[in-house]
Image (tube, grey):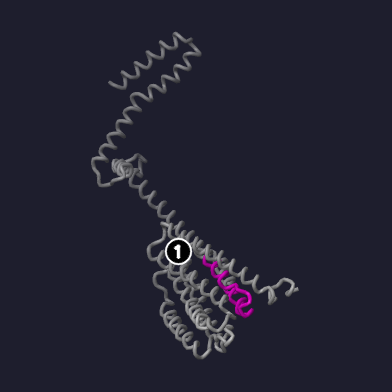
Amino acid sequence: MIDRLGVFNQHAAVNLLDYYTTIEIIISLFIAGLLALVYKNIHYSKQRKRNSYWSLGLLLIINLIEWTSVMLDGFSGQYRIWLVINKFLNHSLIPFLGYFVIHIWVRHSKYDRLLAVLLTGNVLFQLASIATGWTFSIDQNNHYHQGRYYYVYFIICIIVMFAIVSAYHQFEQKTFSGDCLFMFYTFFVVFLGIVIQEVSGGALRTTSLTITIGMCFLLNRFNNFTQKVSDLKISRDNVVMRTDMTDIMTGIVKAGGLTVCACLYSGDRGQVGGTIMFTISFLILLIFLTIVAVPVAIAAFLLKVSFKILGWLIGICFTLALLISLLLISVM
């Protein structure tokens, strides 16, 4: 059945490579979309945008390197040096991705020193593997093989993932009560994708796919956090504004409240003239409502009632007389 599906069928290798290439193109488009969303997000600080760019850009480079390694595997020997460079970069950059992901949420992490030692040691370890074959080796036929100490690299990746989970959990606990179960589920799926690729010997390319999906989930939750913080800030500013504008005992708008409204309306808090003009306009509007609009509304209501009771001619005379009386009383 497996041969019929073509999963490990050598005759279907070309189709599998085409399918893998299509998946990588879709993943790259998703990452480009995430970069665009981060760029347009006004709630991100410059530091968070910068680390998001580094994380997503590095993920894009890692996917490109992994795709290039798959394409070069098994080609003639003249491409051996390029395959060696690709594998060195791939094994060196993947742990660095975790470092930048952590610093999307926090400026400084308690794992910074640990990651600095771990990532530097991993780069040196991968550099030594080029000559010793500890982590990876390329045979004369230009085929990739895992080294005898490959588990050391795998343990480094697990430690980096643990640091990401711990840092993100502390971030959510300090900011808002998040769904911890969903967070751990996301990291479990990413870890499962890495394990599947390693256990299959690279036949099933699931690492880049699951890491990209995990990044989508993490950035989505971080976007929700920034939106929640923005909403809370707006609500707090509205409460402060209402407190400054309204007298607590009487509920009447204070003179200072008119000044705040005037500043917000004019769009320039430093323009005193605009504030005065708006205050005068507001007072004129109140006078107009008191002298003209209110009597007209009352007169219109009485006119309608008088038409029904007294008739058209008498109703119009009665309404005009009442309206003139109300205007005279308002002026006096």
Residue 124 highlighted magenta (yes or no): no
Q: Residue at x 61, y 78 (%)?
A: 202
User: Image check: 216 left or right of 271?
Assistant: right
Residue 304 position within the rendered picture, expressed as x and y whole percent measured from the top left: 47, 17
Residue furthest to the bottom: 132
Look at the picture and state if 232 lies above or below 249.
Answer: below
Q: Residue furthest top?
A: 313
Check the image and name the residue furthest to the right: 1
Q: Is residue 84 left or right of residue 326?
A: right
Q: Quadrant of the N terminus?
A: bottom right
Q: Is residue 269 above or below residue 118?
A: above
The percent position of residue 55, horizontal first and vertical second, equals 46, 69
**Three-letter residue code for mark 1:** Thr
Structural crowding at the residue carrying mark 1, measured as other residues with C-alpha within 10 Å and reported as few (<14), some (14–19) or many (≥20): few
Quadrant where the C terminus sits is top left
Magenta segment, prevailing SS (helix, strand or loop) = helix
Residue 199 on the magenta span: yes
- Work out whether residue 3 can be spotted: yes
**Picture coordinates of residue 102, whole percent (x, y):** 45, 71
- Circle 1 sits on which residue? 175
Q: How many marks?
A: 1
Residue in the foreground of this view, choosing between 218 and 200:
200
**Vertical order, 227 against 332 (above or below):** below
Image spot of residue 83 (x, y percent): 52, 80
Which range is magenta?
A: 191-215
Dot 1 falls on a residue whose secondary structure is helix
Q: Residue at x 37, y 25 (%)?
A: 293
Q: Nearer the viewer, residue 187 or 200?
A: 200
Specify the quadrant of the image occupied by residue 45.
Answer: bottom left
Say which residue appears at 48% left-offset and 77% top-offset: 95
